[in-house]
Amino acid sequence: TAGITQAPTSQILAAGRSMTLRCTQDMRHNAMYWYRQDLGLGLRLIHYSNTAGTTGKGEVPDGYSVSRANTDDFPLTLASAVPSQTSVYFCASSPYWDGDQPQHFGDGTRLSIL
Amino acid sequence: AQSVAQPEDQVNVAEGNPLTVKCTYSVSGNPYLFWYVQYPNRGLQFLLKYITGDNLVKGSYGFEAEFNKSQTSFHLKKPSALVSDSALYFCAVRDGGYGNNRLAFGKGNQVVVIP
């Protein structure tokens, strides 16, 4: 089934360690996004990519980095994890950056930083 | 900047009764409005959207929403709730101007349908 694949599905990580969350889509969407979901706060945008080769900062970018080497992949890296980064992370995509089509979401990565 | 308010943390409704989940928004330009549903341990699934045209929008699984510009609201409704509708519901808005697809999400409403 076409869609977004995120890996791993869950992870426990020691504080100070680095981690890359993987996201792959097979819909040939131009735009991709990373969100974090925290109870009572909804979803907050971390980073986004308009198209392959370009990225931008969202609402809560500190402590995270992204790259977009090709259309399909949009990895999110935590260089040195801290407990406040414990969250559920969702990758999403949409056909175009400024169109009216909804974003499609993966099933998330549940990350605990100890 | 755009924002969404979902004033209720949880909505409880008996099976077969009408379901309403409230959403109000703030945006500087024309609003593009979306409703998503999230089931446990899953990502968000798109239900419906309002971009332009008829204020009453029909979506998946029997849901509909009414856009009210004067009240800046976009409430989600279903005439007869099912137990399987129990989930977390998110309203989202973006400015419909060119060059922006940054969605602002509400905090979500937990819907509990009681058998």
Image: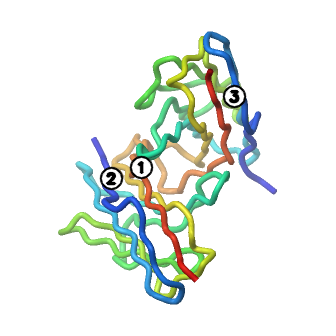
Q: Amino acid at mark 2?
A: Val
In depth, the one of A63 and A93 nearer the eye is: A63
At label 3, counting other C-alpha atoms closer than 10 Å, the crowd grade (few under 14, some 14-19, many 20 or more) is many
Label 2 marks a residue whose chain is B
What's the CA distance linking mark 2 and mark 1?
Answer: 6 Å
Do the residues bearing badges 2 and 1 touch, measured as CB atoms within 8 Å? yes
Please, what is the three-letter code of the amino acid marked with disc 3? Leu
In the image, farthest residue toward the right: A1
Relative image position of residue A39 (x, y in whole percent): 47, 44
Question: Which is nearer the eye, B1 or B112?
Answer: B112
Q: CA distance from mark 3 to mark 1?
A: 22 Å
From what the image shows, is residue A91 above or below residue B15?
Answer: above
User: Mark 2 highlights which residue?
Assistant: B4
The disc at residue A21 is 3
Q: Position of residue B65 (x, y in %)?
A: 41, 74
Q: Nearer the viewer, residue A69 or B94?
A: B94
Relative to A53, say whether B43 is above or below.
Answer: below
Q: Residue, x 37% and y 45% (percent of image)?
A: B98
Are the residues under badges 2 and 1 in a single subunit? yes
Write the residue at 58% across / 81% down.
B82
Asked whether, in this view, residue B25 is left or right of residue B50, the answer is left
Query: Disc 3 and disc 2: Cα gap in Å?
Result: 28 Å
Q: Secondary structure at mark 2?
A: strand
Q: Position of residue B35 (x, y in %)?
A: 47, 63
Letter of the chain that mark 1 sits on in the rendering:
B
Query: Which residue appears at 30% of the width and 46% of the height?
Result: B2
Per the image, label 1 sits on a secondary structure element best described as strand
Residue under numbered circle 1: B105
Residue at left 69%, top 21%?
A13
